[in-house]
Image (cartoon, coloured by chain):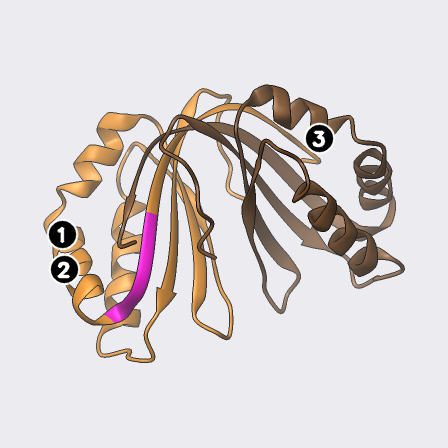
Chain colours: A orange, B brown
């Protein structure tokens, strides 16, 4: 925080989730995935927070829908999503949105 | 969490911020504002998290841009934004985005 993003329009993926108590590889794979996303040209960064009760929000910023789709097909990401459904998340939601306007103190 | 939202399209406001150490009325006014937003027809709810270092993400969901503009003109909200700039936030950013797609475990 704060992620540097270009002038809109660009895209955001809002991932809200409730974690189970189980780690079992979660932290390692999660860290790897964010590190690998950094290498992609269309990825601008993310803001991620999780509270003590396991509720989390991750807001990822992307150049366009094609970049998001490419990330969705990334093998390690697919594997993470499977494991997430099986054991890491009690609940989750993904929202894909087009950023139209941005302003702030920076 | 998780906020119930209708089928897209609808809008989201992503507010990222870094708090100062000062409360001085922040918690009270912040709570009041979220409670009053709940009474507005075009407001669907919010997901808000802040970490121990003062970094926060609030994701608010709205029916359309007109509802967001109306909230921007709400007197208590205008006052809160002024106070926020003066003493509550070291930095902040607002992004307004149109949610095009949504899916999840619910």
A89 in magenta: yes
Residue A87: % across, % down: 21, 72
Residue at (21% x, 41% y) in the render: A71
Does residue B82 sit above or below A47 in this rendering? above
In the rendered image, the vertical position of residue A9 relative to residue B95, given as above or below: above
Mark 2 belongs to chain = A
Task: Using the numbered discs, state the Cα–Cα distance from disc 1 to disc 3 in whole angstroms.
Answer: 39 Å
Q: Are marks 3 and 2 on the same chain?
A: no
Secondary structure, mark 1, is helix
Pointers 2 and 1 in contact (CB under 8 A)? yes
- Residue sitting at x 62%, y 19%: B66
Tell me if residue A1 can be seen: no
Q: Hey, which quadrant is residue A64 in on the image?
A: top left
Q: Disc 3 marks which residue?
A: B71
Of tags 2 and 1, which is closer to the observer? 2
Apparent side of residue B105 relative to residue B37 in the rendered image (left or right): left
* Badge 3: residue crowd in 10 Å (few <14, some 14–19, many ≥20): some
Above or below for A47 versus B14: below
Provide the chain ID for the residue under circle 3: B
Looking at the picture, how far across and down is residue A92, in whole percent? Answer: 32, 56
Q: Is residue B57 left or right of residue A60?
A: right
Q: Counting other residues with Cα less than 10 Å from the Cα at mark 2, is it few (<14), some (14-19), or many (20 or more)?
A: few
Tell me which segment is drawn in magenta. Answer: A88-93
Give the labeled residue for mark 1: A78
């Amino acid at each position: 925080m704060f992620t540097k993003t270009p002038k809109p329009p660009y895209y955001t993926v809002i991932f809200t989730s409730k974690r189970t108590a189980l780690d079992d590889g979660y932290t390692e794979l999660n860290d790897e995935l964010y590190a690998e996303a950094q290498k992609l040209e269309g990825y601008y960064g993310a803001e991620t927070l999780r509270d003590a009760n396991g509720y989390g929000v991750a807001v990822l910023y992307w150049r366009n829908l094609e970049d998001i789709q490419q990330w969705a097909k990334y093998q390690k990401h697919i594997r993470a999503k499977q494991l997430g459904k099986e054991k890491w998340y009690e609940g989750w939601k993904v929202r894909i949105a087009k950023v139209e306007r941005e302003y702030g103190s920076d």
